[in-house]
Image: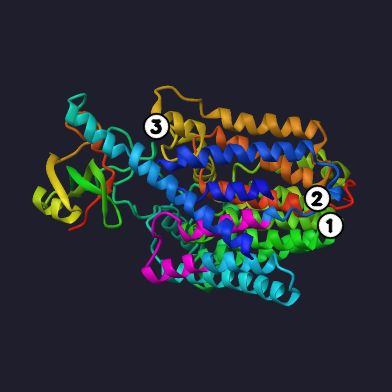
Amino acid sequence: MKRVLVAALVALALRGLVQLAYSTYFCPPRRTLEAVRSGATDTVLERGERVARIGDAIFTCETEHRAGPIVLHHDLDCFCAPATMSAEQVGDRVHGSCTVDHLAPLLADPTGSCHFARCNHYVTP
Amino acid sequence: MRAAAVLAVACCFDGPLRLAVSLPLVMASLAISCLALRNGDGADVRPFPPTLWMLLASVAALGIAMPGNIGPLWLELLRRGFSFFGVVAIGLVSGNSPLWRRRALVASVAGATVLAFIIPAAIPNPLIDVVPWTDTAVRAFLHGVHPYTVQAPDVYRGGADFGFVVRVYPYMPATLLAFAPFVAGIGDFRYALAACVPATIWLVRRAGRRSGADPQLLDAATLMIALHPTMAVVVRSGWTEPLLGVASAVVAVALVEGRSGLAAIGTLLLPALKQYAIAPVILWAAGPGRRTRPQAWAIAAACAALTVFPFLLWNAQATLDGMLFQVRAPVRPRLTSISIPGLLANYASVNLPVWVSAAAQLVASGALAAAGIGATVPGLYAGSAVALLLTFVLGWQGFVNYYVWIGTLLVLAAVTDRPTGTPVSAGR
């Protein structure tokens, strides 16, 4: 029993470490924020399987990446939300600051920061 | 069994970690499976490794920390609590008390069954298109409407771009036949998948017992299936692979009991249930199938054909559109796929052609069949697992549900690996 419990604890600890290492060093929204801030690119997102739903606008939002109460870093990502919501309302929902990227996103539209109507998160009013 | 456990660990990651962690683990499982094929003989000199309990405990523990929520808070607490219980159960089963060993095993199987049956009721409308598509197709069938001519509502409300738009039920007709009684009787096809959990466990144990497997190995196999961290996700999502798990286990039981006719029917029903399940058929045909009477072959082929031909006669074009949808529709690899094309799709501008994975399965299973791997029951299952792992590692779509079924194949290979080390009476 003791060995089994130790193995389970080690597995959980390793899982946590993997997640922490990923969040700290490899988090794509963090790297995006750094790239945008350095002026290397304007693009926040151009690939992904999530796209704007019917009636959605797309917002770029800077949010805090937290591990419980601890703020690890800031992220920059694309959020889909109903076009009836303002950037401030979306920002309140995601606990960050948002700006409108596309009010009527199209799958073929390569402009803006969130290309081809891509977003990584959905916001509901 | 180690390969199955590593594969189960690979199923415990989400998001970008699918490529960073899950994909290497799937490849590690493939490597372990290949090594097991090479060292296939001599199971009698291999004692049960106590480290397997620790590996199983790690798998169960990762169930506590599964990413994402699949349902309401109480269900999350229940499924994660069950994984925690699983760690304790593994500790008890690995101990020296026969009484507690049996109690923990029974509680694990009962708990897994109850959890599986709770899920359809607790999550009636999960956000995955498989459920409305299957439900709509089965209900149409029950109302006398051709199931490949109906349209399911878009659960994503236009918010998904997989590189294709599902316009027809994309699975095999046999799944509709399997699900129809459950929809007609209980109202949700996913109860069929829930029923597959105890059925698979019972069949795996029966196959193992008849093969003379080490009782500890049988218990480990039982816990591997009962405590699989993604079992709840598979049932919730309506993925059909648990049907393949049961069919594969039926074949294993039939082979070790010398019921070649039943083994033939079960084997040929595999591709009738899911389009990609070809490798077990090739390996069986080159092994046990060669010793099977032509009449049994004919009956098995007729059983498989009977699941398809009535639908073809009803509406050939619509049925073919559905059965071949996944072959024709995708225009690019899925970005969330746990596979090399999935990795390349995220980080490169070039990729493998879609036909590579299918060709890899045919070549690998053909080579393994030619090498005589399918001549024994464990060889048949381990060889099938290797060919299918290769298929999905090189595939445009390589998802958790596929790897869960391959895990069941690996478990079946382990429990039928006879302690005597002699070739099994496959197809006797």
* Mark before the other along the chain sequence, 1 or 3: 1
Q: Is residue B30 left or right of residue B343?
A: right
Q: Which amino acid does label 3 sit on?
A: Asn
Q: In which quarter of the image is residue A103?
A: top left
Which mark is on residue B211? 1
- For the residues beneath circles 1 and 3, the answer to whether they share a chain is yes
Relative image position of residue A29 (x, y in whole percent): 28, 39
Badge 1: how crowded within 10 Å, few (<14), some, or many (20+)?
A: many
Residues in magenta, as a range:
B53-82
Q: Which amino acid does label 2 sit on?
A: Asp
Q: Quadrant of residue B128?
A: bottom left
Relative image position of residue A87 (x, y in whole percent): 10, 48
Q: Is mark 2 on a helix, strand or loop?
A: loop
User: What residue is disc 2 on?
Assistant: B417
User: What residue is disc 3 on?
Assistant: B346
Q: Is mark 1 on a helix, strand or loop?
A: helix
